[in-house]
Amino acid sequence: MRRVSQSHKDRAQEDVDHTTNLSLVAGFLGAALGGPVGLIAPPVGVGVGVAFAAWVAALGRHIVVAQRVVRDPPDADYRSLTRASPIQFDLESLSGDSFTAVHAPALDALLRSNSFGSAMIRGLERSQGAALVGEGGFEDERFSEATYFAAQLAEALKAFADSTSGVTEAVRGLPVIREVLPRGGRLMDLLSDEVLAELYRIGVPRGDLNVPVMERVNEDPRELFARGLRNLTDVARRYAELLAQRSDETFSGRPGASAG
């Protein structure tokens, strides 16, 4: 049966590692700038806090999808067509000022990559489920859907990589941020009511914000975020290149349950 190739899994694991690191820094910045006593006065400060918290939510979902690629289990629901889920966040709300507006294209591309990546692996898992019961027609149909969404994922990853330079510049232009928070905890408990209200309004679920936040970092958090985003951008470009090949570098194996 067709599976995620080892090189594909390696790239997905690299994606997980760098996404996790960036998410931790984004959470720290969200708490530092979007807390009840933020560094930047409202209303701009609210938008800055929303932007970093939105990164945490989008990156968290990205990690879940990439981890599914690494695990690659069969799915018995092979008769169902594979569709990409719609993007749930209203990113137009991030266009209120120059800082937050620059984040919207990158976040949109990241969320689209999450949707297409989830559809890709779901199609492949269903193809495997069909192979296990000898349903060759469904196996081919679901695998065709997986390869289609792999191509869509490649385009979304390229769009993400092309839209991050402005984010890096904007983050580096923020005021100096202390390397220690007044207190630690979970992000949803460290954000101001105004920031939380805006996040809920644009569709970010509370559960996406229920993540631990580092109480301190070991260097300028602006530079940590910039470097983490640059690393993730590089990973996204390499991942997109692998997916665009549409060869055994992306998916391995042959039709049928006995093929490994």
Image (spheres, grey):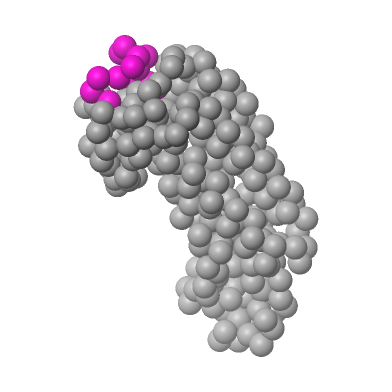
Q: Nearer the viewer, residue 232 or 111?
A: 232
Which residue range is magenta in the image? Answer: 35-48
Q: Residue at x 44, y 14 (%)?
A: 175
Q: Position of residue 32 (x, y in %)?
A: 34, 26
Q: Is residue 137 left or right of residue 174?
A: right
Above or below, 126 relative to 104: below
Q: Is residue 50 left or right of residue 129?
A: left
Q: Residue at x 46, y 55 (%)?
A: 64
Q: Position of residue 78 (x, y in %)?
A: 52, 73
Q: Is residue 43 magenta?
A: yes
Q: Residue at x 71, y 71 (%)?
A: 252
Above or below, 209 relative to 12: above
Above or below, 197 relative to 143: above
Q: Image quadrant for the N terminus?
A: bottom right
Q: Which picture quadrant has residue 233? A: top right
Above or below, 98 relative to 35: above
- Could you tell me if residue 80 is visible in this image? yes
- Could you tell me if residue 116 is visible in this image? no
Q: Position of residue 165 (x, y in %)?
A: 62, 26
Q: Residue at x 46, y 21 (%)?
A: 100
Q: Main secondary structure of the magenta part?
A: loop
Q: Image quadrant for the C terminus?
A: bottom right
